[in-house]
Image: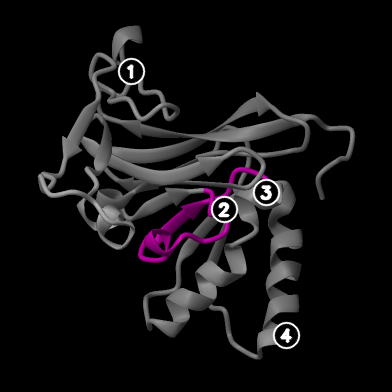
């Protein structure tokens, strides 16, 4: 169990070959920038020259699409302070935190939970239940080792309420532990600081 006075938490580090980026190429997950030299890509849909009516305004309004890549891997997700955080690497089939379980996160097979604040873990039962509903493989969920028993109890409560299996693989990680996805891709937990014990992978 996590100590209440323990303010450190864990972050998970996605370690790729050549993963040490020079400062000008370090990604920022805030602001929609690209990892490469801070450039941003915006795609604008073409719009009609006809006057807009309220009913057609949303259909013809130019749409901006922000894309971010880290070392060539596309990044998707949502982060609204105090409400929801979920960062997705779709080509790797993994997500960091689950927020309120955005639909696009359900297809990710690996989930890394950073800490117990509800804006990062609140959608966890829904994530597992929805994967089961769609007959997807049970996900592998990584959590700080100190949260393992609490997360298992969370699933027990939801199994009793929902009367479903909620199949998943729960992997607790301590600071310094690594999990290897493949020869050139691994995740390592490292120490950082927050108001409650936590980890991001």
Q: CA distance from mark 1 to mark 2?
A: 28 Å
Instruction: Give the Cα separation between the discs numbered 1 and 4.
Output: 45 Å
CA neighbours of label 3 inside 10 A, class few (<14), some (14 to 19), many (20+): some
Write the residue at 63% across / 34% down. 10
Secondary structure under the numbered disc 4 in the rendered image: helix
Which is more foreground, mark 1 or mark 4?
Answer: 4
Q: Which residue is mark 2?
A: 99
| Res 154 quadrant in image | bottom right
Q: Earlier in the sequence, mark 1 or mark 4?
A: 1
Q: Secondary structure at mark 1?
A: loop
Secondary structure of the residue carrying tag 3 is: helix
* Circle 1/circle 4 CB separation < 8 Å: no
User: What x and y, as percent, mark residue 200?
Assistant: 55, 39
Residue at which label 3 appears: 145
Residue 122 in the image: state x and y as whole percent.
Answer: 65, 58
Residue interval drawn in magenta? 97-115
Determine whether, in the image, residue 17 is placed left or right of residue 189. left
Give the side of residue 63 with respect to residue 79, left or right: left
Marks 1 and 2: which is nearer the front? 2
Q: In terms of sequence position, does the residue under pointer 4 or pointer 3 come before the other?
A: 3
In the rendered image, residue 112 lying in the magenta stretch gets the answer: yes
Residue 28 position by quadrant: top left
Counting residues from the start of the chain, the first of labels 1 and 2 encountered is 1
Residue identified by numbered label 1: 20
Going by the image, does 123 lie left or right of 54? right
Mark 3 vs 1, N-terminal side: 1
Tell me the residue that label 4 is attached to.
161
Residue at 60 percent across and 88 percent down: it is 164
């Amino acid at each position: 169990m996590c100590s209440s006075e323990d303010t450190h938490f864990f972050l998970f580090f996605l370690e790729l070959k050549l993963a040490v980026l020079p400062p000008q190429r370090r990604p920022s997950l805030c602001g929609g920038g690209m990892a490469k030299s801070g450039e941003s890509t915006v795609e604008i849909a073409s719009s009609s020259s006809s006057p807009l009516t309220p009913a057609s305004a949303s259909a013809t309004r130019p749409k901006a699409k922000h894309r971010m890549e880290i070392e060539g891997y596309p990044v998707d997700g949502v982060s609204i302070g105090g409400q929801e955080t979920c960062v997705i690497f779709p080509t790797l089939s993994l997500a960091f935190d689950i927020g309120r379980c955005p639909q696009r996160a359900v297809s990710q097979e690996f989930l890394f939970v950073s800490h117990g604040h509800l804006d990062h873990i609140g959608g966890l039962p829904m994530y597992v239940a929805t994967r089961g509903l769609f007959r997807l493989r049970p996900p592998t969920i990584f959590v700080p080792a100190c949260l393992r028993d609490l997360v298992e109890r969370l699933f027990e409560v939801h199994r009793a309420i929902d009367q479903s299996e909620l199949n998943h693989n729960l992997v607790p990680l301590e600071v310094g532990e690594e999990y290897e996805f493949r020869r050139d891709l691994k995740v390592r937990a490292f120490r950082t600081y927050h108001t409650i014990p936590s980890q991001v992978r």
